[in-house]
Amino acid sequence: MRDSIPRSNLVLNDMEKMLIRKAGTTIQYPAKHTVFTAGDISDRVYLIESGWVNMYRLSAEGKKVSVGSIRNPGELMGLSEAILGINRTCFACTIGKVSMVIITRQDFEELMEQHSFLAIKVAKLLGARMREAEALNYELVCTQAPGRLALMLMRMGERMGQKTINGTCLNLNITHEEIANMVGTSRQTVTSLLNTFKQEKSIVYEGRAIRVIYPDKLAKWVV
């Protein structure tokens, strides 16, 4: 897949997660809960234990515009702004129920000073996200809406899909409007394209879930 980032560069290993759990506090959030908003003081770093979180900004018209990828279990969130010591520029909203470990910026910085391997992992993680952001910018300019949606489905399948003998199930319970915000198009276009993917049997609907049956067919839309 184009500009694919190894998952090991995005998630923490067991030792790294254990350090943060010991220094932080575990919090449970319900679905559709705003964890932080643009303008908030960035005095915390978050480790996602379970569930997924969408990162977005608001346009001048008040439209949600997703930035970067959905944050997954094992990933750190709110990291770059906390390290820089600047206010939040994005909103973070849970997609379903989410469990997180929250650690203060001061405690997190002390952990990195004490454990160089954690600091190296953070550097790799930020580098991977920068590369991912560059790829997304390129796709918005150079890839048409069908290709962007196909790429998003394939990436979501790799990172958060449930693998089965009949394909990869994406059971994130997100709306077509939310998907449209992630790929920079309209809800109507997303609905039309998903129906096209369904007709060519690349995907099937299972209630609110989407099962990717033939990722190779989706890949042909990426030109």
Image: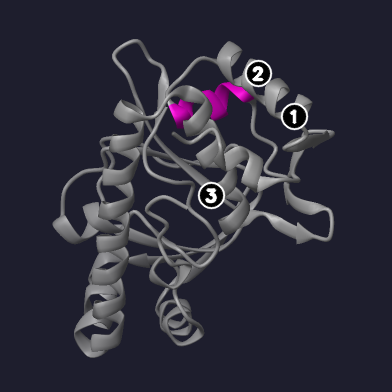
Stretch in magenta: 176-183
Between label 1 and label 3, give the one nearer the viewer: 1
Tell me the residue that label 2 is attached to: 191
**Three-letter amino acid code at the position of disc 1:** Glu
Tell me the residue that label 1 is attached to: 200
Which image quadrant for residue 153? top right
Tag 1 secondary structure: loop
Q: Residues within 10 Å of mark 2 (few under 14, many from 20)?
A: some
Tell me the residue that label 3 is attached to: 155
Tag 2 secondary structure: helix
- Does residue 145 show up? yes
Q: Which residue occupies the foreground of this view, 71 or 109?
A: 71
Contact, mark 2 vs mark 3 (Cβ under 8 Å)? no
Question: Is 132 displayed left or right of 4 in the figure?
Answer: left
**Three-letter amino acid code at the position of disc 3:** Arg
Question: Is 166 displayed left or right of 158 in the figure?
Answer: right
